[in-house]
């Protein structure tokens, strides 16, 4: 008789766990309070991070039994500007892959749902169950532990592919704004890491900048928004329930990316169930240094704000770095990060008293 596994949440972490458990012969039931996978999103273009690891993220997904059955466009060129100076970088290896989030064909969410259903997973939409009855909890961000918010629009356009990031505190306080266009689909957003009450003003400033400096048209716009939560005092297990993804506080505090780690956490939970290993112990060992590195990275990013992010857009620095910074360095808890960590931790605790760090 098959062992039954119950998973709360049909996001990337929950569905990656479900896919692997179903393939291993378990009777998997996913409970999602919304009406479909991806209903939390409204078409957002997000980056499936390829910079945080030397291994290509698509190879990693396949290793975790996740197929690429969703729109996934490589970012090979990036322009960064502070509104006055700009730097353009080109990459032989994709910096990230642009994926759509939402309940529509081509999205990451619908792709994962299709894979889960094909593997035999039972998904129960508009249904939930008490956490103590779940084997895996993948319910997404914890609203009281927010470190970043974003607001923007998605739209159709006739403009060619474009990837521009704006680092300017008037447009995105301590964060960044971005205009991403891939195959006629655009996303214009601002992401703040403080002063969340200024979100509307920052978005308007970002939109003005992009419209004034880049020739592109906006057709059929729709609003999008999101939040991010983070912890280094992660709770990976409550009772029998394994906590995965942002429900466990697994995120990138430096820039707010987390699809890759969400899928990794779901896969790890599935492996621990299959192999009868201690998930909390395995997750702590796998994610602790990564999370600490992004905390130190957030501190370094805020130091880079000096001079209106001059070091970020400085062409001379970029040439000395032979074209572009090795971003994976900032996701490795190396000697510099370890040295800075005590100072960075005090800084982050003061900045975000709501976070478990």
Image: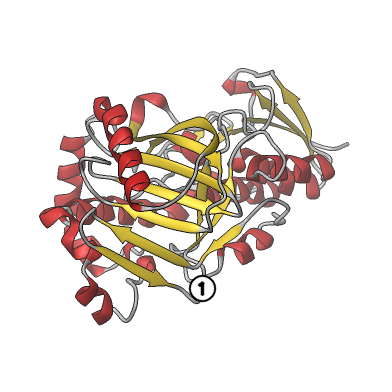
Q: Relative to the observer, which residue lies in front, 266 or 284? A: 266
Does 338 sit left or right of 41 as displayed?
left
Q: Quadrant of residue 352?
A: top left
Q: Residue at x 48, y 32 (%)?
A: 224
Classify the position of the C terminus by image quarter: top left
The residue beneath circle 1 is 93
| Residue 334 x/y as whole percent | 29, 67
> How has the structure been colored for display?
secondary structure
- Residue ranking furthest to the right: 1
Image height of 293 relative to 112, above or below: below
Image height of 103 relative to 34, above or below: below
Q: Relative to the observer, which residue lies in front, 219 or 130? A: 219
Does 11 sit left or right of 147 as displayed?
right
| Residue 134 x/y as whole percent | 63, 27
| Residue 316 x/y as whole percent | 20, 76
**Helix, strand or loop under label 1:** loop
Q: Residue at x 54, y 39 (%)?
A: 155
Q: Residue at x 68, y 61 (%)?
A: 62
| Residue 137 x/y as whole percent | 57, 32
Residue density around tag 1, few if under 14, some if 14–19, many if 20 or more, within 10 Å: few
Total numbered labels: 1
Can see residue 217? yes
Image height of 324 relative to 50, above or below: below
Can see residue 253? no
Does 169 sit left or right of 288 as displayed?
left
Does 8 sit left or right of 328 as displayed?
right
Classify the position of the N terminus by image quarter: top right
């Amino acid at each position: 008789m098959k062992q039954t596994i119950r998973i709360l949440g049909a996001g990337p972490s929950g569905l990656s766990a479900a896919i692997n458990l179903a393939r291993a012969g378990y009777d998997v039931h996913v409970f999602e309070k919304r009406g479909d996978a991806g209903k939390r999103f409204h078409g957002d273009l997000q980056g499936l991070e390829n910079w945080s690891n030397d291994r290509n993220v698509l190879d990693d997904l396949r290793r975790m039994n996740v197929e690429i059955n969703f729109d996934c466009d490589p970012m090979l060129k990036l322009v960064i500007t502070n509104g006055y100076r700009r730097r353009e970088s080109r990459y032989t290896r994709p910096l990230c892959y642009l994926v759509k989030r939402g309940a529509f064909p081509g999205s990451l969410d619908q792709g994962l749902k299709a894979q889960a259903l094909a593997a035999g997973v039972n998904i129960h939409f508009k249904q939930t169950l008490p956490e103590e009855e779940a084997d895996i909890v993948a319910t997404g961000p914890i609203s009281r532990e927010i470190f970043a918010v974003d607001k923007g629009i998605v739209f159709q356009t006739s403009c060619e592919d474009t990837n521009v990031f704006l680092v300017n505190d008037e447009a995105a306080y301590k964060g960044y704004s971005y205009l991403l266009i891939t195959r006629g689909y655009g996303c214009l957003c601002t992401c703040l890491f403080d002063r969340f009450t200024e979100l509307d003003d920052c978005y308007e400033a970002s939109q003005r900048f992009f419209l004034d400096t880049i020739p592109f048209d906006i057709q059929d716009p729709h609003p999008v928004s999101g939040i991010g939560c983070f912890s280094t005092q992660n709770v990976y297990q409550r009772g029998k329930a394994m906590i995965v993804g942002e429900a466990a506080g697994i995120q990138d505090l430096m820039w707010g990316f987390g699809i890759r780690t969400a899928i990794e956490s779901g896969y790890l939970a599935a492996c621990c169930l299959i192999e009868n290993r201690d998930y909390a112990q395995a997750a702590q060992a796998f994610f602790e240094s990564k999370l600490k590195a992004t905390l130190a990275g957030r501190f370094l990013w805020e130091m880079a704000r000096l001079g209106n992010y001059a070091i970020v857009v400085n062409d001379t620095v970029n040439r000395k770095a032979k074209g572009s910074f090795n971003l994976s360095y900032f996701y490795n808890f190396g000697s510099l990060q370890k040295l800075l960590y005590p100072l960075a931790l005090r800084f982050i605790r003061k900045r975000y008293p709501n976070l478990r760090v």
